[in-house]
Amino acid sequence: MDTAQNPGSDHKKTDPPKSVSAYLDPNYWNQRFSDEEHYEWLKDYSHFRHLIQSHIKPNSSVLELGCGNSQLSEELYKDGITEITCTDLSSVAVERMKERLLSKGYEEIKVLEADMLDLPFSEESFDVVIEKGTMDVLFVDSGDPWNPQPATVSKVMAMLEGVHKVLRSDGIFISITFGQPHFRRPFFHNAKFSWSVEWHTFGDGFHYFFFILRKGRRILDGGESIEKIETPSISLYQEELEGEDYIFRTNVDELDS
């Protein structure tokens, strides 16, 4: 069971905000990270560990975008992936993450305050860039998911262009998200990017998507470079209907009817 959903967990449970627009407010996140020890969006590591192990080599240099108070970097480290840089826009999240990692002996993991729309790294700095629910925040005020507002498109493209820039020539971008393939395809397949795209699903009744984008692998002859996997129907359990993931998702991408 997810720590965030476990009534017996040792951290304060955070109530969802009254409006999803709060997710766009830096003050909301600073206050939340001041009070909250740990929360995992989109299930914890155990649910997609097999996918991580299939695509990230232990000697990879990894950049995590929007680390928040997730334990993802710790779990990667335990699996032998030790060259990790975590970033977050919230100064509170960064300081608390530094303290937590140092207290657990993970001195090698770097934690930096950075905006994912303007990454402060040079070209081809990382083998892997990973985000888990971070890009979804950009869609909370996107309007129609089939035709997002120009401001949303601009922000998402800025993020992806930054990711593509800092990835090495054969690097991998992993996006763990609520966003279904038919909504993400227009962004991932933009002509600016050289990556191929594939995806997997994980989760019980509430499915999440694990995208793997491989830089330099795009098919240039006009063929589709996205692996087609049937999108499952969504059947939600009661605890998922009541959770913050569900509240957030219904304002990011419309559920299939």
Image (cartoon, rainbow, N blue to C red):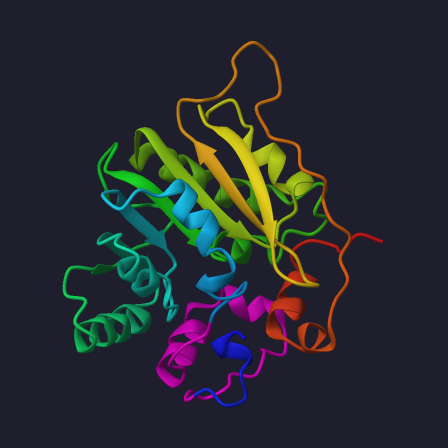
| Relative to 70, 139 lies left or right | right
Residue 148 in percent (x, y) is at 66, 44
- Residue 117 appears in the picture as rendered: no
Q: Check the image and report above or below for 257 versus 101.
A: above
| Relative to 186, 59 lies left or right | left
What residue is drawn where x is 66% and y is 42%? 183
Image-quadrant location for residue 107: bottom left
- Does residue 71 belong to the magenta stretch? no
Q: Nearer the viewer, residue 55 or 188?
A: 55
Bounds of the magenta span?
Answer: 10-39
- Does residue 26 belong to the magenta stretch? yes
Q: How many marks?
A: 0
Q: Check the image and report above or below for 61 versus 213.
A: below
Q: Nearer the viewer, residue 116 or 82?
A: 82
What residue is drawn where x is 54% and y is 88%? 7
Residue 252 in percent (x, y) is at 65, 56
